[in-house]
Each structure stands twice: as C-alpha cells, then as structure tokens.
Image (tube, grey):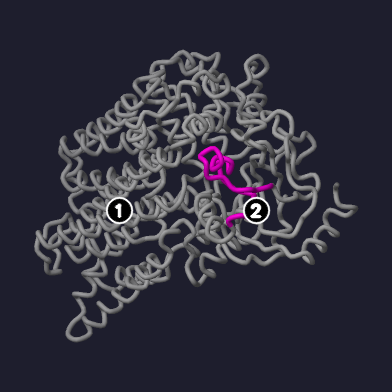
Amino acid sequence: MEDSAGTSTVPDLGRRRVLGLATAILVLHYVLAAASLLRENATVDEVAHIPAGISYWQKGTFKLYHHNPPLARMVAALPVLAMRPETAAAYQSRAAWGLEYPAQGTFAQLFLALNADRYFELLQAARLIQPLWSVVGGVVVFAWSRRLWGDRGAVLSLTLWAFCPNILAHARLATTDIPAAATSAAATYLFWRYLARPTWPRALGAGLVLGLAQLTKFSALILYGLWPLIWLADRLLSRDRLARLGCLPRELAQGAAMVALSVLVIDVGYGFEGVGTPIGEFDFASRSFLTRDGEDPRWRTRPSGNPLLDVSWKHRVNRFRGTWLGGLPSPLPRHYLLGFDDQKIEADGIPLQWLDPTADPSEMTGYPVYLDGVLRRTGWRDYYLKTLLYKLPEGTWALLALALVAALTCRQARAAARDELALLVPPAAIFLAMTFLTDINIGLRYVLPIFPFLFIACGRLSVWAESVPGRARLAAWSAIGLPLAATLLSTLAIHPHYLAYFNLASGGPARGSEHLIDSNLDWGQDLVGLREWLRREAPDEPVGLAYFGQIPPSLFAVRGDGFEWFLPPVLSGRVRPMAAAGQPRVGPAPRLKPGLYAISASLVRGLPWRLHDPIALDADPVGWLLPSWNLGEDALGYFRELRPVGHVGYSIFLYRVTSEQAAALNARYWPGPPAS
C-alpha cells in the first residue's frame, strides 16, 4: 500500500471490505450522535449560535456574535431556515439588533419567544446536521491512517474517533469545536500530501481547506505558524537537501499562494463585509499587538453595551490609529478582526485594577473557572492535562501509551520523519498553546483538535502487531483489542449523556463535578430530561429549580407543558436583579423549605450565572423571556452539604430536603422567623 513513507507490511483487507467497514462505523457514529441529541436540549452556546447563523443568511451581515467565524453557524442555520422561523420582531429590537455591537443573548431569547411553540424542534433540526462535521473528521482520520499504516490501522484509528465519548459529545452540538477539529485536520492532511509531492494542485487544495478551517474557529490560526515549521523541518531533515534548494523558489511561491487563497476564502465566507476598511478605524480593545496603552475616547460617547469591551476601551486603544499604518486597508473582513479581538479579551482576561483601582497591577481576572473543587478567576497550567486524564477512557489511554512504546521500540511502527512531524507537531503545539498562551480553562473542547492526530498515531499499533513473530502475534492483537473493547463499552454505557462522560479512574460521571463543570459535564443540556423525570416521578410536586442554561424553564408552560417551580433560597448578598429585567418579580425563596430541588451541577459547585424568574405567565406573559437575576459565586453552595437522591443526565442533581435538613440550614444561613 503506497504512502509517503513507503509500503506498509500489513496485509490489506480489500478495498471493498475496508470501505464498507469504514462506512458502517461512520453511520453508527452518526446514529449514536443523533439518538443522543434527540434526548437532550440545546446547550448554553447553541442557544445563541443558531439564531446568529440565521441572521447571517437573512441580513447579510456578521455583526451578531462575531466571537468566532461564521461557517459552522451558517451550516447549522440552513435546516432551520427551511422551516421558516419567526425573526422579524427580533430585528426590530435595538438591544438585540439595532446597536453596532448587538447582544447575542437578547437576540437569542427573542428568537426563542417568537418560536416558543416549536423551539425545541427548530434547534433539533439544526443539531441533526452537525454530526456530519464529525463524519468529515472521521473520513480524514481514516484516509490519513490508511496511507500510513494500512487498512487495519485505518479501522483502528477511525474506531477510536467514532466511539470516543468526547467526540460524540460535541459532534451533536451546533458549536464550532468539532467543525474546527475536522477542518483543521483535513487541511493539515492535504498539506502533508503536498509535502510528499509539492505540486500546484495540491498547494491550492491545501490553501482552500485552510481557509475553510479559518472560517470555523479562531484557534485554526495556529496552522499559519505550524505549517511553515513542519515544512522547514521536513526540508532540513531531507536526504537530498541540496537538490531541494532548487525547488525553494517554487515552494515559497506555493506557500504564498496557500496563504493568499485562504485569505480569499475567509473574505468570501464573510461576503467581503468590511474588507478594505482602514486598519486605524477598528475599535480594538484586547491586550495584543493590535492595541497599546491609552484611552479610547469613543467609550464616552458610544458605549458598546458589552461590559468587557467598554472597560477595555478605557485602557486600550488601536495602536494604528493616528499613524500611517492606520490608513492601510484591511485585507480581512471587519467582523473577523473584531471577533478575534473579542476572543483575545476573553482568553487573556483583564487586569483586576481596571475594575478595582486598589488591586495589584499584576493580578488578572476573567471568566470563573473550576478544577478539582476550586473556583477562581485565573486558570491552571495543568488544567488540560488533568481534563484529558479525567475524560479520556482508560482503554484509549492504554492504546496511546502502547502506541508510544511501539514507536520507540519497533522500527516498522515508525513512519518517515515527514509523517511523524505532521502527526506530532500539531497536537503538541495546540496543547502547549492552550496551556501556556491562554487562560481559557472551561472545557476539554478547546483541545479537541489534537484528537485526530492522536488517533491516527494509534494506527501504528496494527503495524507493530503484525511485526510480532509467531504465536505472540495473537497476544499483540489482544493487547490492542482489549483496551479498544473497553473504550467501546464505556462509550455505550454513558449513552446518551456523552457530555457528562468521566472515566472510572476519576470517579465516573456521577462524581464528575468534583473535578470539572461547565462544558465538561453540565452545559444546560438536561432541562428536557428534567421535565420528563418530573412527569414520570413527581407530576404534581413543585420543584425548587436553579438551572445552568439559556432556556427559560417557563418555556414549557408557554408550550402547554408547564410544571410548578420556584427559585431556591440564595446565600446572603449573592444575588441581585438584572438591570435589563426591570423590577424584581418573585425572586428566590426567602428560606429553605422541605421538598424537591433540582440544581445544576455547575451551580452546586459555585459557578455564577443568570436565573430566570418563576413569574405567573398570565400576569406578565413577556417577563419569562429574559433572565431576571444575577447569581454570584457559590450562591447555592449550601447544597454541597446535602446528598443528592438522584440526577438527570448527571448534570442536574436532585435533592429531597427533609424538615430536619431545612431547619438546620435555615438556622445557619437564614436565621430569624420565617417570612409570612
């Protein structure tokens, strides 16, 4: 079998058989993902992603939620557009659409209200198309592994991808993570093919898919640095270095063409909106090469409405404004640059002194992050390593370790230097970049782009097993098959709750929140599951509900399927009404009372959030729409003193509070006579 390293010694399975097996694996992968998403509702980010994608098609501008490029959202929006959702009133809202920097959350909630009667159905249509991105990723993993390790290696690599619980978890979601992982791997695969035979068609193919990767997520920008590094290392390690010098001008021209074509693809993806705008006219605010210290006078006369952006403008200003460089036209779309700037603000955090003049100038603050029982505003250097340790199946870890041993000890299981570079440099660089260059510690999903490369590298195990002589070969294949079977069993056991997967060594999904929360476990996906549980187990009982998600629990009442619920009491000083919500309505209960409570795991572990109010719909039929209360850190931490009696999808804990427990907690946290 041909590949850039030579001919594999592993016997082929036959083209028809191996392609049929790969197709069956990918079909099963899609079926598992689709069956899972139909059991769970849209997560926190999806609620905003899908309406934003609809706005791109309908209005031809990308100003709404430009935190990431638009391709994945636009694809997700296509089946929803075919169902003709109501959107006109959302575009009439100043906060949701009329501002220069509109609020994607407000737009998303208006979209929800306008389509309440079929909201879940609309979002399901968008989500059902999402696993196709993961299928593309599987095709890339299979094709790359097959060229390196043969048919058996390709099937092994594809199986690890298709049945990885973390891939299945995010394959179902209308987010940018799996599209970015799939397209980044596809682009790098084509670049690897180009290195083996640097022709113009291969260069243009790699540049085209590189542009598509840039349209999925800003993390794909790292490829612009990795590809030249891999190319340079490959040429330096080449045996015919002198002969390669003659090809240098052509290859430099091809590299420039890749970059130029990728930029053109980005511009086309944004409909050329804002391309050519003078660089000095952008309102950059992040701590990056785009800005310098200074006060942007625009914040006084034209606040954005985004608190992070407004406070940043008070301290950072476009470094090109007022210089000759500021007059140069931007080759990239307006909202591509502004979205990257927004992401940098969130990734880097902001100096705490910007918010508190008495704070230490070196202290930073950002999104609250959680690891191993600790909630804080700055991340950990070992966050992603621990996240992988907790959320990769033990069988997968065993195969990764065995593949490393095989690469070090078995000559046949090693590929050519070029091939190893293309496999090892991207995951190492992505992992190190996320560990040391950002402070985003909110989910394994940020390192999902390393998974294709890891699984392709595991394909070498088939070559290693075939190289073992005699009867020991069966033992070698058993050493592969048993961990692989363990991974498959652990994935099937967690179905359909893939997002909540934790391996047994970390305590399993029921104890996952002891280690990680947010998109690692509880991303708001189980509200519909809670509704089903209440219908089945407690049809007439009111429930104290604190939900980490973007969907108002009162949506069920609007759809004619409501249940009685109330907000549980909150620790003193850790809740305040949201300004946008107007006057407070019902609010949290003043004291804890006996009964049933359903609390999202992220809130039990102290994450701050926004809660909707359980108002009576007949009294205020619009008030259920937007969140009414800002919940501070650890506002519901007293629930950690209680033992859950169950859970919904592992992300919502169920508590049965007794009279004795209520009395004890009231005496500790809410002393005084009960409110009348």
Q: Residue furthest bottom?
A: 471
Left or right: 333 in relation to 663: left
- Which comes before the other along the chain, label 2 or label 1? 1
What residue lies at 51% left-to-right and 16% top-to-bottom?
Answer: 281
SS under mark 2: strand
Q: Position of residue 592 (x, y in %)?
A: 77, 55
What residue lies at 82% left-to-right and 55% top-to-bottom?
Answer: 669
SS under mark 1: helix
Q: Nearer the viewer, residue 385 or 41?
A: 41
Q: Nearer the viewer, residue 418 or 588?
A: 588
Q: What residue would you read off at disc 1?
A: 30
Tell me, for residue 201, which label it has, or none. none
Q: Is residue 146 visible?
A: yes
Q: Residues within 10 Å of mark 2 (few under 14, many from 20)?
A: many
Q: In the rendered view of the protein, which quadrant contains the N terminus?
A: bottom left
Q: Residues within 10 Å of mark 1 (few under 14, many from 20)?
A: many
What residue lies at 21% left-to-right and 37% top-to-bottom?
Answer: 205
- Tag 2: residue type? Val
Residue 169 sits in quarter: bottom left
| Residue 546 located within the stretch drawn in magenta | yes
Tell me, for residue 543, which label it has, or none. 2
Q: Position of residue 372 (x, y in %)?
A: 61, 61
CA–CA distance in space, label 2 to label 1: 35 Å
Q: Which range is magenta?
A: 539-566
Is 369 above or below relative to 101?
below
| Residue 469 located within the stretch drawn in magenta | no
- Tag 1: residue type? Tyr
What residue lies at 49% left-to-right and 41% top-to-bottom?
Answer: 45
Classified by dominant secondary structure, the portion drawn in magenta counts as loop
